[in-house]
Image: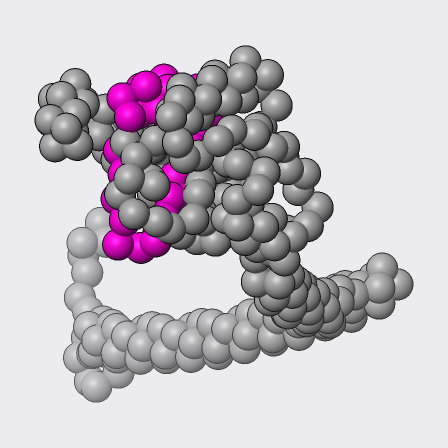
Amino acid sequence: QFERLKKILESEGLFAENRKRPLPQFPKQIGIITSPQAAALRDVLTTLKSRMPSVPVVLYPSPVQGRGSGEKIAQALQLANQRAECDVLIVCRGGGSIEDLWAFNEEVVARAIASSAIPIVSGVGHETDFTMADFVADERAATPTAAAQCVVSDRHALRRGLQDQAQHLQRAQRNRLQNTIQSLDYLQRGLIHPAQQLQRQAQQLNQLQQRMRRAFAYRKQQQHWQWQSLTQRFGKAMHTTQAQRSARLENNGQHLALLNPENVLARGYSLVQDASGR
């Protein structure tokens, strides 16, 4: 009967992983479906109180063994969904024989779990026990205590994690603050007071003026040297030209003296003319 029902439900996709929902990380309220007299209830409540005592718990009482207990479990599941006051449900009972756990193998319970709008954790029996509720539930826990551990985080571990994150944030903040201070100090060293900036610019302007004066004086001196050089060259050229012209004039004078008729007569020659002066 167990294997026959398992094949039917599996063929309908009730065991498929893609239909199972993740459990809420921080549930605001937890529902438990079990018998008020069950030892599993005490284990679950003790674990929840130890791990996260601030989360309230709602008990949906139901017999978990005997004739008609399957229908009662299904009705408790339906009631929990109708009231919709919990973020996650735990269906649990302690260990026992397969006959003791048979209520969780009934089809009505399996279909009630599958149709639940609230995520369900199944914690039935011991680690080696498997029921139809385990296959259909969103999460299967080995024991009721493990089911309680599935639905809430350990407050001590959360506190340690928060402390580690706080220390990490403090270190990061200190490092960032130190880097910012260093950057500001570097930028501050690069800042110059307006009066100092004006004084520096005045010094630069004075240096430029001095350079301009020196350049102007050098240019003037250079032009003076060029003028002197041109004057000397012009004087030399004039003297040379004058000497050349004087030499040519003297040479021409000597040639004219040689051709002067008076000089010829002075050497004993005579000039004879007739009455007409020819």
Which image quarter: residue 47? bottom right
Name the foreground residue: 5 vs 175. 5
The image quadrant where one finds the N terminus is top left
Q: Provide the residue span drawn in magenta.
A: 106-132
Q: Is 221 drawn above or below residue 54 in the view shown?
A: below
Relative placement, left or right, of 155 versus 143 is right
Q: Is 87 drawn above or below residue 101 in the view shown?
A: above
As for residue 113 lying within the magenta part, the answer is yes
Q: Is 69 drawn above or below residue 271 in the view shown?
A: above
Name the foreground residue: 122 vs 271. 122
In the rendered image, is residue 113 in sight?
no
Q: Position of residue 30 (x, y in %)?
A: 58, 36
Residue at the spot 53% in from the left edge and 36% down from the top edge: 35
Residue at the extreme bottom:
267
Q: Is 21 drawn above or below residue 111 in the view shown?
A: below
Residue at the spot 61% in from the left edge and 54% down from the top edge: 46
Residue at the extreme top:
82
Total numbered labels placed on residues in the image: 0
Which image quarter: residue 26? top right
Residue at the extreme front:
67
The image quadrant where one finds the C terminus is bottom left
Q: Position of residue 49 (x, y in %)?
A: 65, 52
Name the foreground residue: 119 vs 44. 44
Relative placement, left or right, of 107 versus 21 is left
Relative placement, left or right, of 5 versus 90 is left
Residue at the spot 59% in from the left edge and 38% down from the top edge: 36
